[in-house]
Amino acid sequence: MMKSKTMKLQIAFTLLLTFSSISAFASEPNEESFLGCLLKESHDNTISSIIYTPQNSNFSSVLDFYIQNSRYLNPETPKPKIILTPTTESHIQTAIYCGKKHNLQMRVRSGGHDFAGSSYISEVPFFILDMFNFRSISIDVESRTAWVEAGATLGELYYSIYEKSSSLSFPAGYCPTVGIGGHISGGGYGGLTREYGLAADNVIDARVMDVNGAILDRASMGEDLFWAIRGAIGSNFAVILSYKITLVEVPENVTSFFVSRTLEQNAIQLVHKWQYVAPKLPKGLTISLMLSSGISTRTGEKTVIATFIAVYRGGVDELLSIMESNFPELGLTKEDCKEMLWIQYFPFHLGQSIDNIKEFLTSRVSPNKPYFTGKVDFVKDPISEKGLEKILSNLLEVDPFLGIMEWTIFGGGVMDTIPESETPFPHRGNLMIMFEVAFWTPNDSSSVIQTRIDWLRKLHKDIGDYVPNNPRGAYIDYRDLDLGVNNVVGETSIEQARKWGAAYFKDNFDRLVKVKTQVDPDNYFKNEQSFPTLFPYSTKIGDTECFSSS
Ligand SMILES: Cc1cc2nc3c(=O)[nH]c(=O)nc-3n(C[C@H](O)[C@H](O)[C@H](O)COP(=O)(O)OP(=O)(O)OC[C@H]3O[C@@H](n4cnc5c(N)ncnc54)[C@H](O)[C@@H]3O)c2cc1C
Ligand SMILES: *[C@@H]1O[C@H](CO)[C@@H](O)[C@H](O)[C@H]1NC(C)=O
Ligand SMILES: *[C@@H]1O[C@H](CO)[C@@H](O)[C@H](O)[C@H]1NC(C)=O
Ligand SMILES: *[C@@H]1O[C@H](CO)[C@@H](O)[C@H](O)[C@H]1NC(C)=O
């Protein structure tokens, strides 16, 4: 028994070696042969209408449309050789087949919000598979489920659900232009996370296309791949076509408030108290916190503004009484509270007008795309007032409103009870997630931009004294290349990849490497932080018992 198993393995291994030697020595990437292949292999004569080369006058506008961080909208950003905007699954099949055959790297883009531009930037020749045409959404109110295609946005999903039922929603992020493909496959948190978990926790099925062009659902892909695409970013393993999600019940009407306090108004003490109060509030009341650099209207001096943004499933009087008994220090008044439809809370949370919900939720890009960089932390225990002072003092060192943090409560709900290995996202059992952002403006010089980036790193360093550090947690939906990257050319060792891998995934990293090895053994789906395979070609020879010289 043992022997035949070993032999089988050895044969499989030899085959693998032969196969990957072919791909390792494949011709240089060549977009001409890639193009030729697309036209030849496609059994669908519409393919020419979805191909954009730099010669096409619309190439730049197609490329730029879903670049959502203006930081990457400049001539220095590496450009793709070709953009494909598939309208059928067979287009995607042909793209993967020809990309592999002609060794042209593929980057998959849905909403284009990747912090590092990983869906549309690469240091090696590449093409973009732009999924924006795949955006249908079908809602089944009866079973409280929906199928949503990867290229739909969160806002489109929320609005489609609302059109069918004003008392159903989906637990995910607030930013309406974020794409389903990246958001859900990387985890996805928001105001309902404490109650219902991550977006990825509410996925019950999926359709993907694998590296061989096969279309798989949950049953045919198996539980390993289905696990990996709920938190470790789809494009490391496959192209996500759609997810089937469960919808959650929300009240039609809610009460909300948006209350700001500066340092002079005891912001530090209030933030300190909030950490103890927020995780213990009844499930229907969520208070998030936005911290920003600002100017005191009283003194005209720089200050820190702490804004408590809340949504409650119930009326004003109940809300006031809960606040009075749990958080009287905030001094909430009836005038601070506003009754609104649940759906209106999405723009309200972001400080936007609640009057034109449809436009707010269904516009696919923001009219003013920001310039920014961000980082993240997971906080386990409440931070002392002294610690808060140290962290928040950073906000006095940046121009008003160009440095912000968004603190979202995880603790006191289902996030505490879901095991770390349930999905690739391991950061369960935390008090909160801290999102740290530095902005700049269109005319800022490169030295000013560098100052902002350095400011963010300093803030992050200071927060490091108050969060678990072995390893320091990170979140792949807020991709951070400072954590480490793969080699641009050639393979990357598992130990090198573990630098970022352990931060994002803790002990789930090793299982992700195994899944990667199973589903994409030749490692075609590559990016700055994609998983290495267990037996990369370069380390095979001499590295295993079969070939060891000793
Ligand atoms: C302003 C802003 C606010 C945000 N707010 C939140 C928030 O509240 N909560 C939260 O959790 N996150 C938030 N995010 C982060 C967001 O969830 C991630 O950036 C997410 O990955 C974006 O998905 P996308 O499809 O828009 O991005 P893309 O740039 O298109 O893709 C991101 C990654 O996913 C891969 N990918 C995209 N589509 C597919 C596909 N169809 N198949 C396989 N792989 C694919 C890409 O290759 C890339 O690696 C925010 C981001 C921004 C910029
Ligand atoms: C570019 O886009 C415009 C507007 O969508 C369209 O009318 C035109 O035909 C496109 N041109 C090419 C070369 O695809
Ligand atoms: C929600 O509020 C609207 C407008 O005030 C009202 O017409 C509606 O009946 C309310 N819905 C519920 C379920 O109370
Ligand atoms: C940036 O510079 C341009 C041209 O110099 C100017 O028109 C514009 O007003 C400036 N924008 C800001 C925000 O300062």
Image: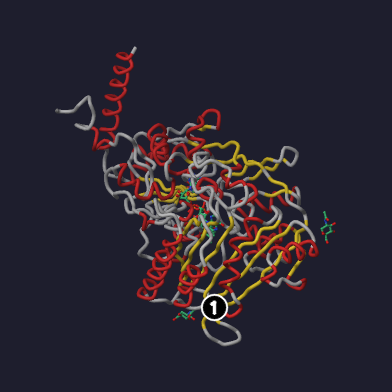
In which quadrant of the rendered view does residue 492 lie?
top left
Asked whether mark 1 lies closer than 8 Å to ligand 4, one says no
Viewed as shown, does residue 10 lie left or right of 518? left
Number of callouts: 1
Query: Which quadrant holds the C terminus?
Result: top left
In the displayed image of the protein, which residue is found farthest to the top? 1
Disc 1 marks a residue whose amino acid type is Gly
Dot 1 crowding, Cα within 10 Å, few <14, some 14–19, many 20+:
many
Measured from the top left, where is residue 147 in percent x and y? Answer: 63, 41
Q: Residue at x 46, y 37 (%)?
A: 93
Viewed as shown, does residue 406 lie left or right of 527? right
Q: Residue at x 67, y 71 (%)?
A: 329
Measured from the top left, where is residue 161 in percent x and y? Answer: 70, 49
Q: Residue at x 35, y 75 (%)?
A: 447
The secondary structure type at the circle numbered 1 is strand
> Which residue position holds label 1?
294
Measured from the top left, where is residue 58 in percent x and y? Answer: 47, 58
Please tell me which residue lies in front, 411 or 508.
411
Please tell me which residue lies in front, 281 or 490.
281
The reply to whether residue 449 is in sight is yes
Measured from the top left, where is residue 302 in percent x and y? Answer: 51, 82
Q: Is residue 388 above or below residue 496?
A: below
The reply to whether residue 51 is in sight is no
Q: Is residue 20 above or below residue 4?
A: below
In the displayed image of the protein, which residue is found farthest to the bottom? 299
